[in-house]
Image (tube, rainbow, N blue to C red):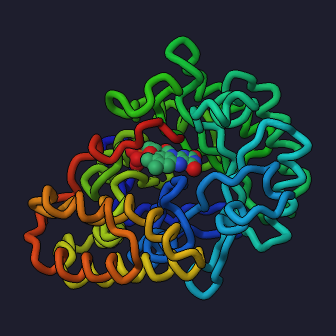
Amino acid sequence: MTARGSPGFVGLPPLELGTLSVCPPVLLAPMAGVSDLAFRAIALEMGAGLAPTELVSAKALFHGNWRTESYLKRDPSREPHLYVQLFGGDVEIMASAAEEVQRRGAVAVDVNMGCPVKKVTRNGAGVALMADPGRAARVVSAMRARLDDEIPLTVKMRAGWGPDSRNAVVFGKALEDAGASALCLHPRTRIDGYDGRADWALIAELRQAVSIPVIANGDICSEQDADAAVDRTHCHAVMVGRAAMGNPWVFRSLLARWRGESTPPAPTAQERVEVTLRHFEEHLASDGDELRAVRRFRQQLLWYSRAMVDTAYFRPLAVAVDSAQGLRDLVRTRFLDSAWDTSGAGSLNSLSPGVPLG
Ligand SMILES: Cc1cc2nc3c(=O)[nH]c(=O)nc-3n(C[C@H](O)[C@H](O)[C@H](O)COP(=O)(O)O)c2cc1C
């Protein structure tokens, strides 16, 4: 037990979201270009309790384009709970989108109020909603009104629009009043990107201020970080983003820790081959265009190889691979021939996207 009587991460109760019981209370973060069905299914299989989709444009949802449809692909046998993250700035469009994703099988809906990318914020969406709390609350209450009662509506946000407007706590309170079921906080502002450390003290403040569940996000990379985050914030659940990229095994370690078991061994090279190629084959099957699928998977390959002791030889081959068979051969030969660093996931800085995405 910690000083404040919190049970800590070990044995933390399931995260209750309406009728959804998230067990263990560990989520894969929504990540554009990462959180596709294949990766969500792998994360869930490894031990994540819930995995939202990447951000889906509320507006695009009604235009039937290939990419948006691919974000919403589902397979109930491997992903029992479809949890869709929507972004948009228009109250009515967001409300209609909530209804639409519910119709398509979502059992939980999240609103992105954290994305700092200009393409998103210039339309009043993402973290721009934190600069307009009145509209943000109207978005939540309009979506709430259109969703069935048992469907949880969560919000993922940042610390605020900028250093002078770190309003996550009052903002979160207003969203609770508007009908949000839970809040997830990545405590950096839009300006921070991924600089410095995530300010977990702000999560603790939010946790004190609201009665709905709070999910801690930001720099949680290991079971030790999950312990520390729960101790310091008293959050109801943790969410892991960059540390899971190319490293879904992080959820195996988190699950073991949550159960009070010892840390499982690092994945073997053979396991790395198996999971990487399973992810690729599914990605390929869902894309249909071999070259496009291979090109889009190159980034994943770099992530899957990040614990390789010497990546200097592998990286140029990975970014040049241009056929499915070439990719399979590369993974089989190089992954099995390489030595792997089993001490941890590697540096988060090397993984941060050029632009901060959420
Ligand atoms: C490649 C990438 C894509 C992301 N896409 C989204 C997104 O679609 N929606 C969202 O809310 N956040 C997005 N984020 C932010 C993450 O969900 C998370 O809040 C952030 O990475 C901090 O958590 P971490 O320190 O565990 O990585 C993205 C982050 C990365 C690295």
The one of 282 and 255 positioned closer to us in this rendering: 282
Quadrant in the picture for residue 70: bottom right
Drawn side of residue 107 relative to residue 197, left or right:
right
Quadrant in the picture for residue 262: bottom left
Percent coordinates x, y for residue 59 in the rendering? 82, 49
The one of 198 and 291 positioned closer to us in this rendering: 291
Percent coordinates x, y for residue 129 in the rendering? 71, 30
85, above or below 126, in the image: below
Drawn side of residue 233 relative to residue 160, left or right:
left
Residue 258 seen in the figure: no
Tally of numbered discs? 0
Residue at the bottom extreme of this rendering: 77
Residue 322 seen in the figure: yes
Percent coordinates x, y for residue 345 in the rendering? 23, 57
The one of 184 and 60 positioned closer to us in this rendering: 60
Residue at the top extreme of this rendering: 164
Residue drawn at (83%, 47%) of the image: 94
Residue drawn at (57%, 32%) of the image: 116
Residue drawn at (50%, 55%) of the image: 29
